[in-house]
Image (cartoon, rainbow, N blue to C red):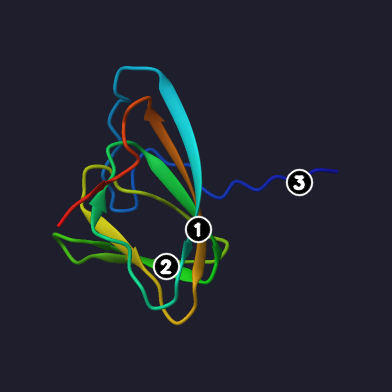
Amino acid sequence: MAVSTQVLQTSSSWNGVAYEPYPDGTPQLTVVRYSIPANSSLPWHVHHMPSAAYVISAQITVEEQTTGRTLIVRAGEAFAESVGSVHRGYTGDEPAEILATYSGREGLPLSVQEE
């Protein structure tokens, strides 16, 4: 018998900002598996669409650029990505595997790198 476990359902991102209505256009769902080396960080970036990520292995720390606020997400946990807020993720002593789902529209980039 199949078993399902809901790991996340929310209408706001991890930093408490409510999601806005979707942009006009044809909806496009994207799923990306990220392999992030140990002791490394992703570039500062921003999303313009709701997305959620599930940590498959190890852990990742999500950090907001403007506030320095952080969230540690461990294997088996999920989090709602922020929209319109510059942030990054970084790993500790172990490489992390993350599965991210993006709910956007055709032509909208998954993320935009910031300085």
Q: Secondary structure at mark 2?
A: strand
- Residue 114 in the figure: left or right of residue 10: left
- Residue 77 in the figure: left or right of residue 22: right
Q: Secondary structure at mark 3?
A: loop
Q: In front here: 97 or 7?
A: 97
Point out the tag, 3 or 1, that comes first from the N-terminus.
3
Density class for disc 2 (Cα within 10 Å; few <14, some 14-19, many ≥20) is many
The answer to whether residue 18 is above or below residue 79 is: above
Q: Secondary structure at mark 1?
A: strand
Q: In this figure, which residue is indicated by the disc labeled 2?
A: 60
- Residue 76 in the figure: left or right of residue 108: right
Point out the tag, 3 or 2, that comes first from the N-terminus.
3
Label 3 to label 2: alpha-carbon separation? 27 Å
Name which residue lies at 38% across and 78% down.
39
Type of residue at label 1?
Ile
Q: Quadrant of residue 36?
A: bottom left
Q: Position of residue 112 (x, y in %)?
A: 25, 45
Q: In front here: 60 or 41?
A: 41
Q: Are marks 2 and 1 in contact (CB under 8 Å)?
A: yes
Q: In front here: 56 or 34?
A: 34
Q: Are marks 3 and 2 in contact (CB under 8 Å)?
A: no
Q: In this figure, which residue is indicated by the disc labeled 1?
A: 98
Q: Position of residue 56 (x, y in %)?
A: 57, 61
Density class for disc 3 (Cα within 10 Å; few <14, some 14-19, many ≥20) is few
Q: In this figure, which residue is indicated by the disc labeled 3?
A: 3
Name which residue lies at 27% across and 60% down.
43
Point out the tag, 2 or 1, that comes first from the N-terminus.
2
Quadrant assignment for the N terminus: top right
Type of residue at label 3?
Val
- What is the total number of numbered labels drawn onto the structure image? 3
